[in-house]
Image: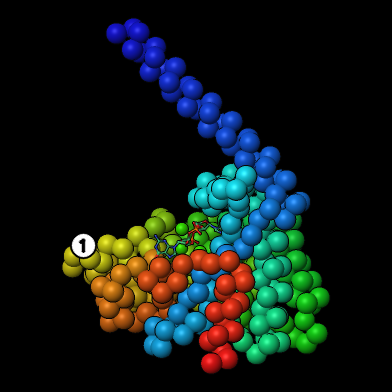
Amino acid sequence: VKLTGRNGYQFFNKTMQQNAERTAYLQMEMTKALNDQGFELYFQPIVSTQNTHIAKAEILLRWKLHGEFVSPEEFIPIAEHSGLIVPIGKWVREKAIKLINQFVEQNTPIALSVNVSTCEFLNDELQHQFIDSIKSCSEQSCKTAFPFELLTLEITESLMMDQHQNIENLLIRLREWGIKISVDDFGTGYSSLSYLANFPVDQIKIDKAFIQKIEQGARHKALVEAIASMSNALELTVTAEGVETQTQLDFVKTQKVDDIQGYFFYKPMPQQEFLALVEKQFCS
Ligand code: C2E
Ligand code: CA
Ligand code: CA
Ligand code: CA
């Protein structure tokens, strides 16, 4: 009995140590990647429910380490804990702003959304940096007024929960410029619905966990229906995320959902492929 207990203990310890080593390793490699252009942006087109045209795309970070992709599910939390998400997030937004500008110049106006971690807003200093970087980059990349309405920031419920007055002020300011604020993974957090009524947001993304249970029965459908109708009552734009099957698509279409994102239409793709797709849509 003692032996098993001890083995169990050692095993537990070893896993923990391996995890810590992997985290430290990834953190170090991420710092290098940031300096050596080791990150890449992928684009997942989002189609309008009405005509399945590409109206928007979500930018998703990709990182290849020694020839293999590391999942964002693994490296984003490490970037958040280490603070590396701040320069990474800034880099992603600057790329997005430049690309929006390019789209407008070539007459293919596609809206781009970027993910923002709650820890990028954590204090006054970071909030100033956040505002400044968007402002200066948009001024640099655009001769005339930058079309802020083509930029969406995807935040999560945790940001609304933190209930800092200054975060609310920051979002209000960004929205005054025309930037759209979207609540990502809606329904998976613990925020109370009252935040939704008070917080300055434009859009809701129904989490893929809800969409993917649609086939499982009426109760799951009812949940999607409820989220969609509540969002509509609050006059928010609704995106269904993670639509993979015809059944899911058919159901979502019966709901007041504005946009669809999911493998059924498009998977995230490299920039070149995305640009070619956009060009094809606008030029044919
Ligand atoms: P997210 O923001 O919820 O992004 C949507 C995720 O769902 C993406 O995973 C996308 O590839 C995946 N997805 C889209 N459609 C489908 C579908 O039909 N089926 C399935 N099974 N999956 C689908 P990905 O790219 O692995 O990203 C994971 C998460 O990493 C993102 O979840 C987001 O929270 C985070 N992330 C990615 N890029 C960034 C970034 O630049 N900044 C920050 N802060 N977080 C990021
Ligand atoms: Ca997102
Ligand atoms: Ca999401
Ligand atoms: Ca997610």
Q: Quadrant of residue 101?
A: bottom right
Residue in the image at 66% along x and 71% along y = 96
Above/below status of 255 relative to 129? below
Assess mark 1: CB under 8 A from ligand 1?
Answer: no
Q: Quadrant of residue 102?
A: bottom right
> SS at mark 1?
helix
Above/below status of 182 relative to 102? above
Residue indicated by mark 1: 216
| Kind of residue at disc 1 | Gln
Quadrant in the picture for the N terminus: top left
Q: Is residue 122 visible?
A: no
Residue in the image at 57% along x and 81% along y = 278
Q: Going by the picture, which residue comes out furthest to the bottom? A: 284
Q: Going by the picture, which residue comes out furthest to the front? A: 67
Q: Where in the figure is residue 5, as x and y percent of width and height?
A: 35, 13
Above/below status of 109 relative to 239? below
Pick the residue in front: 107 or 16.
Answer: 107
Pick the residue in front: 74 or 87.
Answer: 74
Residue in the image at 64% along x and 59% along y = 40
